[in-house]
C-alpha cells in the first residue's frame, strides 16, 4: 500500500436515555437527583486493532425538540441542523496501515449510558510516486481509557430534599509519533494533544422542585508536527465547547407546573498553520446561541403556553486570507426580530 496521511472524521450523537448526558450524574445519585447515570462525562475513543489511536470530544448538541421545543424557535441550537465532525489525525499510524495486513479502526464512546450513535469516515491520502510505503510507530503515550475524577457534595434533608453539587473532571495529555518512507523521503508526524473536560452541576431536588444547573467545558489543544517531505511544519488547533444550562421545574400551589430554562452554547475554534516557524494561516470561529423560555403546564402536564422566549445567535469567522463573516440574529416570542452584521467585520477575541 502507499498510504501517506490518514484522518478520521467522527460525529457522535447522544440518543435515547442518554440524550441529555450533560445532566447525567454518578450512578449512586440517579434516583435522588432524577437524572441519567455515568456522570456528565462523555468522550469518543479511537482504536486501531484494539490499541489506542486517538481521542475525539463529544459536542453537546441539543436537538430542536430538546428540553423545550420553544427554546429553538426560530433559531436552533449550535450545529443542530449542521453537525460538524471532529477530525482525528491518524497519520502517525500510516506506516502501520501500510504493512499489507487487514486492520480494524474502532470508534467507541466512553461512559455512554446505554445508547449512543457514532459515525465516522476514513480519509486517506496516498503517495502517487511510490507503490509501497514502509513505516511504523515511534512512540504512543495515549492510554486506553480516561480516568475522570468525580466529586459528590450532595446533602439529603427531610422531604426528602437533595441539594448540593457534583463535579467531574478529566485531563488527558498524550503524544503519538510515527513515520513513513515516501517517494520524497522519510516523513515523521507527531500528534500532541491535551484534552480537558470539566462539568459542575448544582441541584435542588424535592417533591415540588427540580432545579439542575450545569456548567460544562470541553477543551482540546492539538499540535501536529510534520518533519520531512512536502508537508513540513506544524498545525496548532484549539477547540472549546462551553455549555451552561439552568433548568427549573416547579409544582405550583394551584396544581399547575412551570418549567424555566436558560441555555448558552458555544463552539470556539482557532487554527494556526506554521511553516519554518512562521504563521502561514490563521482562522477563528465563534458560534454562540443564548436561549431562554418558560413553559407552563396544567395539572395533567399538558402545555398551556410559552412565555419569555428570547434567543440570540452570533456567528463570527475570520481567517488570515481576508475571509470574514460576522452576523447576529435576535428573536423574541418565537419571531425573528433583528439581523445585524458586525461593523467592517472587525476581529474580536474569543
Image (cartoon, helix red, strand yellow):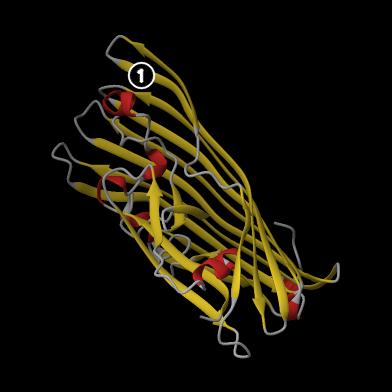
Report the residue at 37% width, 44% height from top: 21
Judge by depth and name the residue closer to the eye, 288 or 260.
288
Q: Measured along the vertical axis of the image, is residue 163 above or below residue 138?
A: above
Q: Tell me the quarter of the image containing the C terminus.
A: bottom right
Residue 37 seen: yes
The answer to whether residue 169 is above or below residue 5 is above
Res 110 quadrant in image: top left
Residue 210: image quadrant is: top left
Instruction: Please state the horizontal and vertical placement of residue 80, each as a whole percent of the image.
Output: 41, 64
**Few, some or many residues within 10 Å of mark 1 (<14, 14–19, 20+):** some
Please determine whether, in this image, residue 4 is positioned above or below residue 130. above
Q: Nearer the viewer, residue 57 or 33?
A: 57
Residue extending farthest to the left is 300
Image point (32%, 40%), residue name: 259
- Quarter-of-image position of residue 89: bottom right
Label 1 sits on a secondary structure element that is strand
On the image, the x and y values in percent for residue 49 come to 42, 58
Q: Position of residue 243 (x, y in %)?
A: 51, 47
Question: Viewer-proximal residue, 123 or 160?
Answer: 123
User: Which residue is rendered at x = 45% and y = 64% of the image?
Assistant: 10
- Tell which residue pokes out farthest to the top in this image: 158
Residue hosting label 1: 162
Amino acid at each position: 500500500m502507499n498510504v501517506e496521511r490518514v484522518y478520521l472524521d467522527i460525529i457522535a450523537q447522544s440518543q435515547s436515555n442518554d440524550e441529555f448526558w450533560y445532566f447525567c450524574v454518578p450512578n449512586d445519585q440517579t434516583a435522588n437527583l432524577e437524572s441519567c447515570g455515568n456522570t456528565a462525562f462523555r468522550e469518543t475513543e479511537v482504536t486501531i486493532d484494539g490499541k489506542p489511536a486517538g481521542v475525539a470530544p463529544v459536542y453537546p448538541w441539543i436537538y430542536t425538540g430538546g428540553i423545550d421545543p420553544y427554546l429553538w424557535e426560530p433559531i436552533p441550537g449550535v450545529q443542530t441542523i449542521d453537525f460538524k465532525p471532529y477530525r482525528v489525525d491518524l497519520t502517525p499510524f500510516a506506516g502501520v496501515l501500510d504493512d499489507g495486513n487487514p486492520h480494524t479502526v474502532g470508534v467507541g464512546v466512553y461512559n455512554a449510558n446505554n445508547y449512543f450513535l457514532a459515525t465516522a469516515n476514513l480519509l486517506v491520502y496516498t503517495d502517487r510516486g511510490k507503490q509501497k510505503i514502509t513505516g511504523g510507530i515511534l512512540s504512543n503515550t495515549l492510554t486506553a481509557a480516561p480516568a475522570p475524577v468525580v466529586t459528590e457534595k450532595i446533602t439529603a434533608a427531610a422531604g426528602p430534599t437533595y441539594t448540593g453539587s457534583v463535579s467531574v473532571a478529566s485531563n488527558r495529555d498524550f503524544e503519538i509519533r510515527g513515520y513513513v518512507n515516501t517517494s520524497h523521503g522519510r516523513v515523521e508526524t507527531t500528534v500532541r494533544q491535551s484534552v480537558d473536560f470539566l462539568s459542575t452541576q448544582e441541584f435542588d431536588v424535592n417533591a415540588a422542585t427540580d432545579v439542575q444547573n450545569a456548567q460544562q467545558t470541553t477543551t482540546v489543544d492539538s499540535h501536529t508536527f510534520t518533519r520531512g517531505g512536502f508537508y513540513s511544519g506544524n498545525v496548532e488547533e484549539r477547540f472549546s465547547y462551553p455549555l451552561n444550562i439552568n433548568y427549573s421545574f416547579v409544582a405550583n400551589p394551584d396544581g399547575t407546573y412551570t418549567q424555566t430554562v436558560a441555555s448558552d452554547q458555544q463552539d470556539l475554534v482557532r487554527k494556526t498553520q506554521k511553516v519554518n516557524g512562521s504563521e502561514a494561516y490563521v482562522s477563528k470561529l465563534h458560534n454562540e446561541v443564548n436561549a431562554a423560555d418558560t413553559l407552563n403546564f396544567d395539572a395533567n402536564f399538558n402545555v398551556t403556553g410559552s412565555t419569555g422566549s428570547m434567543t440570540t445567535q452570533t456567528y463570527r469567522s475570520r481567517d488570515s486570507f481576508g475571509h470574514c463573516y460576522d452576523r447576529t440574529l435576535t428573536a423574541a416570542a418565537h419571531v425573528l426580530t433583528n439581523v445585524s452584521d458586525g461593523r467592517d467585520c472587525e476581529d474580536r477575541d474569543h
